[in-house]
Image (spheres, coloured by chain):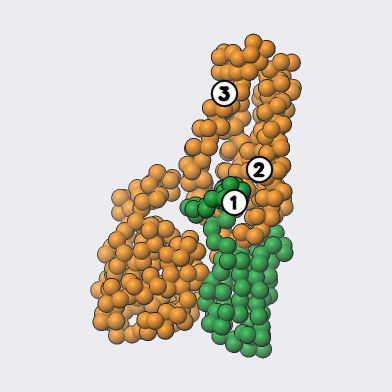
Amino acid sequence: MATSLTWRDHLGTIGARSGLCRNNYKLIPGLYCTGTPDPDSPVLATANYKLSFDALRKELTGIDAWILVLDTRGINVWCAAGKGTFSTAELAYQIQQARLAERVSHREILLPQLGAVGVCALELKKTTGFKGIFGPVQASDLPRFLNSGKIADEAMRTITFSLAERAVLVPVEICLLWKPILIALLSIFLFSGFGPEIFSLAAAWQRGVTAAATTLLAVLAGAVATPLLLPWLFGRQFWLKGLQTGLIAGLITLILFSKQAGLLAGFGLFLWSISISSYLAMNFTGSTPFTSLSGVAREMRRGLPFQAGTAVLALVCWVAGAFF
Amino acid sequence: MKDFRYIDGAAILKLDREACIGCGQCVTVCPHRIFSLTEKKAEILDPNGCMECGACSRNCPVRAIYVNPDDGCGCAALLIARWFNTLIGKETASCC
């Protein structure tokens, strides 16, 4: 197996990262290898999501190793471990299927640290005889880990969320949104048509374009600016972080459109911006590696009523704005 | 993770120090480095750093650690779907 990625791998990465083929980017589970491993070579376990597999193999240049790929239905190690597919039982099954005990003389298997959510090392030892050793969080630390006697330092064991790590999540966030955005845009054009003449197609189009532009700007604020600016926005709750980017988007909207739409309708657009941005920022909690589900539930009890309230008020102002 | 902090007092994480045998597995697997071994027992140094991933509890040989068992990646859309489905009495399939 190659340890360098080809243009096809990179093209696939773009496809998966943009959400086009993210849910079906997998490989066949089983035993693979890099270089020419012998019975003494290390065994590394990973998920059958191709991005996970690629992240691992490209770090193994010049290293002879066995790679045991678990069937996680094309989901990455951490999420799969959380959902129970990257598990002790699945690992035991693949060890048996690959007849690993006959191929290697040692009884050690290196596991990604984040796999610990689903794999219990002690249980693995009991059921298979293989000792599970948790390696670093990032595959890029593997060569250093292997060369230092399989000991990971604190940095290797700590999860990070750098600007680059956040930026790579943005395209998927946007692409998963196309359905709700489409529905929102259709309703926006519908509501923009209401006015003194009951319903006007011309108004639906003219005012609709303004409201649609506002919506897209708010999506940028909530799903692009918030993730990128995450550490610099005030507060810890994501709906408040999204509120800040939404305020800026709303002010831009006011400056651009309030003359043409009127002050009341302009205020509606402003409220709409902060509602959308706040909600999308809150939804980004699902993509970060540091938000607890209990915390998300707690902030949603405050954020959701605010977002729903401002959205309804925005709608009222927008429709009323057509009359005044 | 020191540069990102989430809501204090939210995460549900409990350690039974009496039951702990000091194997140190929780110290090893925690991606936020919130455990430490003191006097041959695990100790939670930074409870607010917990994201409820559950790795410590999964790898504890004596079940001395309890973490909010609610699975799911924790995005708002999933929680809304779940709350809504509870209202109408339906099961929620997990998201991503």
A103 horizontally vs A238: left or right: left
Q: Nearer the viewer, mark 2 or mark 3?
A: 3
Q: Three-letter amino acid code at disc 1?
A: Thr
Which type of secondary structure does the marked residue at label 1 adopt? helix
Q: Three-letter amino acid code at disc 2?
A: Ser
Mark 1, chain letter? B
Q: Nearer the viewer, mark 3 or mark 1?
A: 1
In the rendered image of this protein, does residue B69 appear above or below residue A104? above
Q: Nearer the viewer, mark 2 or mark 1?
A: 1
Residue at 43% over, 49% down: A17
- In this rendered view, identify the residue nearer to me: A258 or A61: A258
Chain A: what color?
A: orange
Neighbor class of circle 3 (other Cα within 10 Å; few <14, some 14-19, many 20+) is: many
Mark 3, chain letter? A
Residue, disc 2 = A278
Residue with the most extreme top position: A197
Residue, disc 1 = B86
Q: From the top left corner, tell me how far across and down residue A122 is, in percent.
A: 47, 82
Check residue A189 in the rendering and tell me which mark sits there, or answer none: 3
| Quadrant of the drawing holding the N terminus of chain A | bottom left
Residue at 40% over, 50% down: A23
Mark 2, chain letter? A
Is residue A136 at all visible to an observer of this figure?
Answer: no
Which quadrant of the figure has residue A245?
top right
Which type of secondary structure does the marked residue at label 2 adopt? helix
Which quadrant of the figure has residue A212?
top right
Which quadrant of the figure has residue A123?
bottom left
Q: Which chain is green?
A: B
Q: From the top left corner, tell me how far across and down residue A297 is, in percent.
A: 65, 55
A28 horizontally vs A139: left or right: left
Q: From the top left corner, tell me how far across and down residue B49 is, in percent.
A: 65, 66
